Amino acid sequence: MNEGYTLDTQDFAGQHEDPDTGGRTFCAGWVARPDSRNGIQVVSIAHPSIASASRSAAARLLAAILLLAASGCAGGKPAPPPQSLQWLCMGTAAAVSAPAGQPARVKRLRETVGAVFAEIERDLSIFLTNSVLNAVNAAAGDPTPVPVNTHVAAVLRHALDVAEAGGGAFDPTVGPLMTLWGFRGGPVSHPPAAAAIAETRERVGWRHVRMDLSDPAAPAVALALPGMRLDLGGIAKGYAVDLAYDRLRAAGETDFLINLGGNLRAHGVPGAGRTGWRIGVRDPFHTDRMLGTVVLREGEAAATSGNYERFVVLDGVRYAHIIDPRSGRPVIGVAGVTVIAPTAVQADALSTTLFVLGPDAGLRLLAGFPGCQALWVLDEQPVRTVASPGFRMR
Ligand code: ADP
Ligand code: MG
């Protein structure tokens, strides 16, 4: 039995009419395009670097959560949509938005946010050979801890906390399984044999990560087992969004929305007379449609994990890029999870965790995370969603 609500999409959409604006919404940023293959969108996952990510693929990734702006006037003509600048970063699309009519400010926001994202990518990417994270991975099995910087230590700390809270559903050492299933390129066309999965799982396990924080100014990390590999793809973007948010706030900026591949964090409002930044949750089965919309409160974050943007097809079966570390196999049964949380790092880590756990265990876990709400879209027809109580009532 679910502890939350099961609701149909009509019900969900109806919950989110904005009373201040007559419920009118329009697309301010990106429109998800219908796909010729019945809503299934294929994105190259062989090497999702900036160089290989096509602009349209990146735009589709960003459209996992559609950015919407509520029409800001009750009786008159619609207020102008917010202004956004977009660019490619961390193998996905990044964007920053601000109320209309402030082009110089949007440019300034983009510069600050872009610098933060580039900094975090240099630290945490598994695709950049010189990243700090890859230095740790290269030393797996060596008991001497590798010096890392405070960002790597902070993200890893968050990741290990979520791993523990979720009973290992989230695991930052999932790297070898991602490779085994073909999510990191290479000639994989069949699902791996059970023996190969079992052998690979021996090199996966968050409890084998040793963090040396004895000198907080000089953190260091060791991976206890040879062949272990950290992969922070389920949390790093959220961390980067929080860091960018804090930098903008420290610089006195207000009224903006940051988006990194569907990891969002909002401040203030998108224009005069508006209640807040309104985001739309995309229907994973009909990517040109929305299941509903939510207005983010001050400082709130949202993230979506889905099975429809990054996946592999092995023997004709589509596998999502989220692995259940407890079985060593890609998760089935969930099409998408959207999380709203006080911070983007929480939203990002939780969206991946709740995708693995599914609604029953997921709702139990969520009860221990104040201010966090989730919506699951199950991988079944007709479409069925499960929302935590607070998500439904927003
Ligand atoms: P996206 O990267 O599309 O925003 P997620 O935030 O859900 O989606 O992260 C998925 C990524 O997280 C995968 O590409 C992989 O790098 C990593 N990952 C996959 N399974 C797990 C897991 N069980 N725990 C932690 N990280 C995972
Ligand atoms: Mg995530």
Image (cartoon, helix red, strand yellow):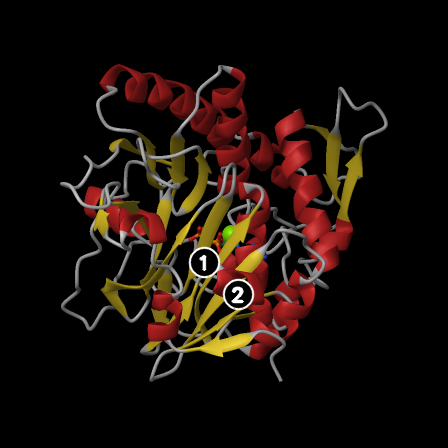
Q: Is the C-beta separation of discs 2 and 1 under 8 Å?
A: yes
Q: Is mark 2 within 8 Å of ligand 1?
A: yes
Q: Which mark is residue 223?
A: none
Question: Could you tell me which residue is drawn at 23 percent across and 19 percent down?
Answer: 103
Q: Work out which residue is located at the far right of the displayed protein and give it.
A: 214
Q: Is residue 224 visible?
A: no
In the rendered structure, which disc, 2 or 1, sits on the residue that comes first in sequence?
1
Q: Position of residue 309 (x, y in %)?
A: 33, 59
Judge whether 327 appears above or below 160 on screen.
below
Q: Label for residue 305?
A: 1
Please give left or right for residue 138 compared with residue 66 in the image.
right
Quarter in which the N terminus is drawn:
bottom right
Amino acid identity at mark 2? Phe
Q: How many marks?
A: 2
Position of 3 relative to 136 (above/below): below
- Write down the residue under mark 2: 355
- Residue that appears at 45% across and 61% down: 321
**SS at badge 2:** helix
Determine the secondary structure under disc 1: strand
Q: Position of residue 340 (x, y in %)?
A: 52, 52
Residue at 31% x, 78% y: name it. 316
Disc 1 marks which amino acid? Ser
Indicate yes or no: mark 1 CB to ligand 1 under 8 Å. Answer: yes
Disc 2 to disc 1, how far (Cα)? 7 Å
Q: Is residue 148 left or right of residue 37?
A: right
